[in-house]
Image: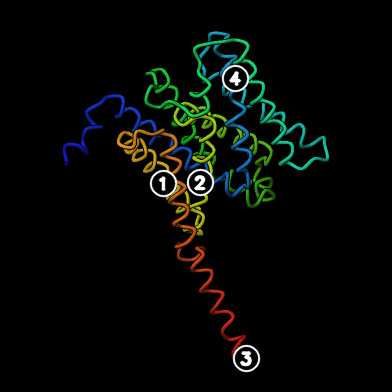
Amino acid sequence: MTEELLVPFAYDYMLRAMAISALVGAVAGLLSCYVVLKGWSLMGDALSHAVVPGVALAWMGGIPFAIGAFASGLLAAGIMAWLRGRTPLREDAVIGVVFTSFFGFGLFLLSIFPSNIRLRTIVFGNVLGIADSDILQMAIIAVVVVLVLAVKGRDLMLSLFDPVQLKAIGGSPGAMRLLLLTLLAATAVAGLQAVGAVLVIGMLVTPGATAYLLTDRFGHMAGIAAGIGTGTGLLGAYASYFLDGSTGGVIVASQALIFLVALVLAPRHGMLATRRAARRAAGPEMAA
């Protein structure tokens, strides 16, 4: 029995899949804290879909997919910001229009310019077949994102909670918004290769949402979210070998399961704790 459980570690492609899934999960988990606190869940969804035409154009131009996808994501973010300041539309409407337009354009390009890029790979990822060059790109993206968060994390937090204080110390809320969008686009590119455009949004939202239920301190929230991303990435890729299912699907489903447990059992913000607090608050009133 023990030997059977160790079988995945005998295959190089499984070791690579587990390592990359854990790496992307950790970075996406860290960023998910900012996404949740900023209320940008739909923005993460938009960027994960907006990179698709960049992938198609990169293949047509013979350049690395990561460059095309990253440029496409930044362009989409720029268009969203431009439209948001020049139309009376709500932000969610602007985001929805832009990301569906980019995604549709990407599908159109893939349909009229047949290539070796499979739509299924873009949408659902293929971490088991990842190339060495892709691993290097993902590692570079992960290191850069973590370094930027280490240097600019405090300013990003101020832009979320106290933009006036950020301006007072010489910072720019607009620049921090652009920086966060850039980091999201870069992580969406990395996640695209691991779990695909559809599932990357789960990795960019669910760990942070789960951690938010478990703690009121940002440092703890970031640690919990990164731990969830790393653990589900590693164990999800491992479990997918035995389940013979989509690696990305197993990872995101695992994160969703952890979220549901936290939603119910979280000590302060879980459903059960909230219900108990409501009963305690109602008790004196009923007695009176």
Question: Are circles 3 and 4 on residues that touch, CB within 8 Å?
Answer: no
Residue found at x 77% / y 33%: 83
Inspect the image, locate mark 2, and give the three-letter code of the amino acid beneath it: Thr
Determine whether the residue tagged by mark 1 lies in a helix, strand or loop. helix
| Residue closest to the eye, 165 or 49 | 49
Residue found at x 51% / y 35%: 200
The dot on residue 228 is: 1
* Mark 2 Cα shell of 10 Å, populated few (<14), some (14-19), many (≥20): many
Determine whether the residue tagged by mark 4 lies in a helix, strand or loop. helix
The dot on residue 47 is: none
- Is 50 situated above or below 65? below
The quadrant of the rendering that contains the C terminus is bottom right
Label 4 sits on residue: 54
Residue found at x 47% / y 35%: 147
Label 3 sits on residue: 288
Label 1 vs 3, first from the N-terminus: 1
